[in-house]
Image (tube, rainbow, N blue to C red):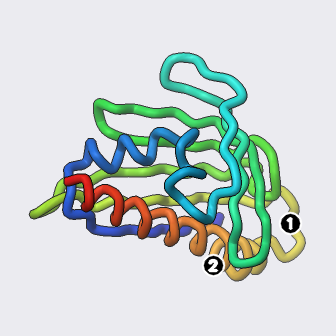
Amino acid sequence: MTVTRNSVDVAAPAGTVYALGSATERWPEILPHYRYVRVLQEHERTRIVAMGAWQDVFPIRWIAEQTNDPVTPHIRFRHLRGWTRGMDVEWTFEPIAGGTRVTIEHRLQFAFPLAAEWLGRNLVSAYFVHGVAAKTLARMKAIAEARA
């Protein structure tokens, strides 16, 4: 299993960052590297979303189940389609002095065994997953701190 973690300390309350992260339908408006997010289904705190982003010049896309928990707060994605099918993603919000530490953790077990560990670690995780998550957190930090 390949695990990728991205964290950022944000000088804003958890609720401010959670509101930005959970409203995926608005991501293309606030995150320049997101091409689109379409809500395909929605039921209470769970939704199915089709997402597309850029990692440098490479377009990537996937479909995920998103579960929002505003009380904890916590956001979970389970990738349903795309190269990352089966990947679990968790957004956690930890109170720290002066704000919130936001962590995005991706856990991926490739379905095909041939070179899965190397590809997962060096290409999918290190380049695509880490790259997109780093851009997402940097932009969320800037917006949340401007609003705080």
The type of residue carrying mark 2 is Ala
Spatial CA span between label 1 and label 2: 19 Å
Point out which mark residue 18 bears: none
The residue at the point 49 percent across, 24 percent down is 45
Q: Nearer the viewer, residue 122 or 55?
A: 55
Pick the front one: 90 or 12: 12
Q: Position of residue 56 (x, y in %)?
A: 70, 78
**In the rendered image, the vertical position of residue 126 relative to residue 26, given as above or below:** below
Q: In the rendered view, does 135 fall on the left or right side of 127?
A: left
Task: Measuring from the top left, give residue 120's x and y in whole percent.
Answer: 72, 72
Say few, some or many: other residues with alpha carbon within 10 Å of mark 2 (under 14 / 14 to 19 / 20 or more).
some
Q: In the drawing, does residue 52 fall left or right of residue 73?
A: right
Label 1 element class: loop
Query: The N terminus appears in which quarter of the rendering?
Result: bottom right
User: Disc 1 designates what residue?
Assistant: 113
Please name the residue shown 20% across and 63% down the image. Answer: 11
The quadrant in which residue 52 appears is: bottom right
Q: Residue 59: where, in percent of width, then height?
A: 79, 65
Q: Residue 126 carries which label?
A: 2
Q: Which residue is drawn at 54% across and 59% down?
A: 31
Q: Where is residue 36 in the image (x, y as percent from the top left)?
A: 69, 49
Location of the C terminus by quadrant is bottom left
Identify which amino acid the numbered label 1 is placed on. Pro
